[in-house]
Image (spheres, coloured by chain):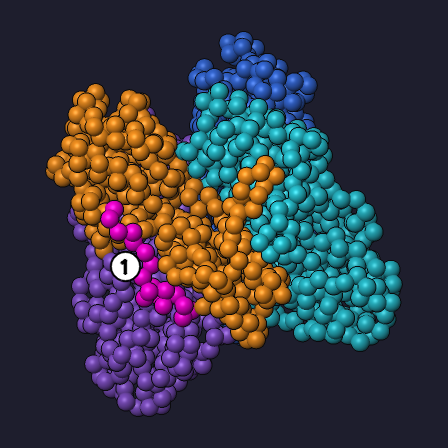
Chain colours: A cyan, B blue, C orange, D purple
Amino acid sequence: MRIGVLTAGGDCPGLNAVIRSVTHRGITGHGDEIIGFEDGFKGLLEGRFRPLDLNSVSGILARGGTILGSARLERARLHEAADNVAALQADHGIDVLIPIGGEGTLTAARMLSDAGMPVVGVPKTIDNDISATDRTFGFDTAVTVATEAIDRLKTTAESHQRVMVVEVMGRHAGWIALESGMAGGAHAILLPERPFDPADICAMVDQRFQRGKKFAVVCVAEGAHPIEGTMPYGHGEIDPYGHERFIGIGTRLADELAGRLGKEAKPVILGHVQRGGVPTAYDRVLATRFGWHAVEAAHKGAFGSMTALRGNHVELVPLRDAITVLKRVPPDRMEEAESVF
Amino acid sequence: MRIGVLTAGGDCPGLNAVIRSVTHRGITGHGDEIIGFEDGFKGLLEGRFRPLDLNSVSGILARGGTILGSARLERARLHEAADNVAALQADHGIDVLIPIGGEGTLTAARMLSDAGMPVVGVPKTIDNDISATDRTFGFDTAVTVATEAIDRLKTTAESHQRVMVVEVMGRHAGWIALESGMAGGAHAILLPERPFDPADICAMVDQRFQRGKKFAVVCVAEGAHPIEGTMPYGHGEIDPYGHERFIGIGTRLADELAGRLGKEAKPVILGHVQRGGVPTAYDRVLATRFGWHAVEAAHKGAFGSMTALRGNHVELVPLRDAITVLKRVPPDRMEEAESVF
Amino acid sequence: MRIGVLTAGGDCPGLNAVIRSVTHRGITGHGDEIIGFEDGFKGLLEGRFRPLDLNSVSGILARGGTILGSARLERARLHEAADNVAALQADHGIDVLIPIGGEGTLTAARMLSDAGMPVVGVPKTIDNDISATDRTFGFDTAVTVATEAIDRLKTTAESHQRVMVVEVMGRHAGWIALESGMAGGAHAILLPERPFDPADICAMVDQRFQRGKKFAVVCVAEGAHPIEGTMPYGHGEIDPYGHERFIGIGTRLADELAGRLGKEAKPVILGHVQRGGVPTAYDRVLATRFGWHAVEAAHKGAFGSMTALRGNHVELVPLRDAITVLKRVPPDRMEEAESVF
Amino acid sequence: MRIGVLTAGGDCPGLNAVIRSVTHRGITGHGDEIIGFEDGFKGLLEGRFRPLDLNSVSGILARGGTILGSARLERARLHEAADNVAALQADHGIDVLIPIGGEGTLTAARMLSDAGMPVVGVPKTIDNDISATDRTFGFDTAVTVATEAIDRLKTTAESHQRVMVVEVMGRHAGWIALESGMAGGAHAILLPERPFDPADICAMVDQRFQRGKKFAVVCVAEGAHPIEGTMPYGHGEIDPYGHERFIGIGTRLADELAGRLGKEAKPVILGHVQRGGVPTAYDRVLATRFGWHAVEAAHKGAFGSMTALRGNHVELVPLRDAITVLKRVPPDRMEEAESVF
């Protein structure tokens, strides 16, 4: 078989592990030919690709980023691709396409699949918000980075009697905040799934100070937001260039808490460190397994599907199931977290 | 409720996270009274315990080891305990016992449960070999430590053209070797589940050298063993004190490979670093969830059960199911690993 | 001897290692009595202290923060203290005071020393900007944390073809930016010691893109600033509460570069993670040595002095020498860094 | 200038950082041509080298090992090289040779230098035992790895009431044991510089147990040895192949302590993990500076010299000074360490 692989969407630790695994399994398991498209779907459309052999994926298992690059593609060009699936496939001579990506990529993958391209998707997102799989690779690394930051911030907060507000990634789902908050022992965890009242956080801080604990750490997902009317609406400010500048919830909440509590409250915005660099062992294993199973699926002709973790097994699920519902943090998971604040 | 908690068996990162979680959930969720028995079942039998409140579990979430200590207990004394369950329970006034431990501990827990003690078990083992749960806490930390070691050893092996043999824990099941070998990109993984032939490893090394790769890393579980007749039987040597000294498989295999290949082959025995120290974020979350659910189980009267991870959910399973079959690495998991050597 | 120890100023990994070392060396080496004042000079003035023995410093060597706490004190109250040195010393019965702190603390220490208090200072600052010592503890940890972040950000930048601007600590001296920038392999390092022209950074980025490197990482100290007239002056914006909000150089520079280059440019502000948490081995050793030598100095009557690293030796220097000149990054160190961009 | 660079001797984190720095400084600072000899002096003798440009050293700053490889060379062949220095230099057209290595390499470098080859050496050894420089790169990484292991082992030892014996590298000098023992808070540190009496260690352990501390950690350099007559002489045992097998001091000491104390005592032999993998920020900076200064020295014609750290400065010292005296741990450094046991 001639297998085309590409990575699309935001960065995610583990992408290279999938590329390596697809290449190894294809070549040593089946005698396949593997090509890698550069910069995601763009490379597919523009015919930019390179052959991948064992040497070209040597040493990349633990490397962050993606050796194939990734880039955004306008939706119009994707539709164009879908309209020319047969030609595209013929041009590159590929028997199957393995796109590795998040919700947007998988939607595009489904579009191509529906148009007749043989596709096996591999889901990736540090946000862990894809319903069809128990976990996605990249998530464990993001949680680990955020937890290490909270570990460090706690000692500082404790020594200096202040409130620290740590903003982690998660625009629509609060998984990173939930798990890094639990692992780091944050005293409040704020998620997009449930609007918060800053008064509740102040009450928690006051209680802690009364118990003799002179600090608190709040872990907030970037997509969390206050109950309407409880905090000034966060219009972006106007910067020196005349542009509106977006002020994230971490900074806004720290300001709000400082004002209400009359105590020091400092924001820390973790940002892109969560999505780059060496993947954790967990993510390397999961990514490697996904790559292996994607190749097997290709050889079984299980097109239009996607790899998914279910318990300890990697299974195949239809691409259409993967992207219909965002996996959000359910109430019982929040309840578990709350009791150990 | 008055809840007694204890930790028994070998060390395992995450024990303190369970103790903290039981204490928090019991006290803040239910108004329970929590006591911790010292040194495992010994403390239970000898009446050594201390009350646990929020302050006594403050700052232990990320700490390795167990604040309650752990010790071995002879089987005879356990039987004695089982014979006096009613008295023991009355003496300490506990409404439920939450023992945290591995196979031996859970067997003891079941014995007490069968004798009438209200028990909710929490499984722990870095070996990940308990059938009833998808994963155990401690395992991810052990894999992470082993993977970091393999990462380091690979660059050394590569620069100096040698074979490194890394021995990791796993007497009866090879999960740590499997996952750290995959995550570290080892070129052979040897498990207790499948006897190996050193000739196969030599063939792999030779092939790598022919491909221009002048090194190889072998990850071997301490319980792995050669196919009979392929290697000299590893009688322990006699040490200067006249005692037989056990020589582990890592050292023996490195000797064997050096002899067969005529190349440098060095063993590294990771040992106890795999089971101590700061737990990973994954293990802290899982341990915290197990503690939470154990308390809930106690309040629901679900005695004779054990917490277990199933997919993303923590469920309760009967203690008797937990300990009947050792969870070993199945053939399909080995196959996944082999293709990326 | 009765030795009083206190920690003052901002957080710095290694403070606990000094406290532990002073306690151990005093008690086991000299039979001293050790007391720890709480919250820095505040505790000294308010008579809040606790005895320290081997058990009270057990397990703190690797812990971030300070078990004694730290707090700001108004200058007026310090003068008051200086005016009552004899009474203060008599009240607490201390034979020597060992204050651990940065420039402000050492200035206060000198004031008390000049007023007659027997003082031996221990310098600490993550900024490494005290002239009298080759290095300060805390600095290595800060550099390590910043380097790990740059390592992670590089893979993300590379995969997604963007410029990352990492803002690290260093208001008056650029040591953290210099060393983390060198260690992380940043492509530009901007220090308070030398105003920069954003046009130079754009030129560097353009050159890299022409060489086929589709990303760049800029490491900027929080105290770095542009040559006058090269960038809009960074008035803080007005936040929703009507307060002026300070916008740091990292964010401003990323905006500027994005505008000039027409490429994505993202800021990451590391903030307080640099000054909390587990100290590196280097910092633990240096902090331990400083504590040891401070006690020796006390027993030799070398008051009015401060411990300092000179080459491999810990020496004593007069407090007055310690705080006169800020140690800034000299031009030759910048030249070393520039050649490996 | 045409600069030849090579790496020789055992592995050491930071080698690639030197290679990268030499290449960058040579090319961008002076327009030099850089070639890298493969496998140390072997490549020099056999004419195996490759040109190094900015792209060939891209991404290696944080990578362990050496991209040039390293191999042992018999002394006879080195003498042969020294006898043919003019021909060698003419063959490769190099104006200067920059060998990066430890004591053996620097001795060879001096031999070539004395024979007329323009040489600037760069010292490397994880053992930190070269007199002429305050520190060598690689050492900080080794200490960091060993300290992390001790951190992990302490919690395990504490929970399970046992003595752990950690064997670290250091055949002739005990620097790694000294600093990792101090940083990890070991309760005894045993160095080649001072023979130990196992009775003293037993006394320390007994005292700790009496104080209620039910564990101890001993950090022992591989080259440490008991005072004659205090322990059975460690003849290697005979292995199943009939060869004598060397049993290291860590294993022997653990056996001895277990026997004398009647308590569990376990050895952990860290081995090669100490010398591979990602270098610490400290080592990357030092290695980068050494490379930079070696190129500058070449352009100044300062042949027969070696880079050395003195305080915060990198200076040049004559090669002959570098290798005459091994830098061993002096008594005052041992005294500092002992007081915090």
Estimate the x, y position of residue D8 in percent, counting from the top left. Answer: 35, 71
Estimate the x, y position of residue C11 in percent, counting from the top left. Answer: 39, 39
Examine the image and state in which quarter residue D96 appears.
bottom left
Q: Judge whether residue D223 can be spotted in this image.
A: no
Query: Would you place residue D266 above or below residue D328 in this image?
Result: above
| In the image: residue D106, left or right of residue A100 | left
Task: Name the residue type under label 1.
Answer: Asn
Furthest residue toward left? C300
Using a 10 Å C-alpha cutoff, classify the residue at mark 1 as few (fewer than 14 neighbours), some (14 to 19) or many (20 or more). Answer: few
In front here: B296 or B317? B296
| In the image: residue B112, left or right of residue B313 | left
At 80% from the left and 76% from the top, the residue drawn is A91
Mark 1 — on which chain does it sit?
D
At 51% from the left and 68% from the top, the residue drawn is C199
Considering the image in quadrants, where does the N terminus of chain A appear? Answer: bottom right
Estimate the x, y position of residue C222 in percent, counting from the top left. Answer: 45, 52
Query: Would you place residue B214 above or below residue C324 in this image?
Result: below
Considering the image in quadrants, where does the C terminus of chain A appear? Answer: top right
Q: Which residues are magenta?
A: C323-340
Instruction: Count every numbered label the image shows and give the total.
Output: 1
Query: Would you place residue D145 above or below residue D112 in this image?
Result: above
Question: In what element is the residue under mark 1?
Answer: loop
At 35% from the left and 29% from the top, the residue drawn is C39
In front here: C135 or B293? C135
Q: Which residue is mark 1?
A: D312
| In the image: residue A12, left or right of residue B35 | right
**Residue B219 magenta-highlighted:** no
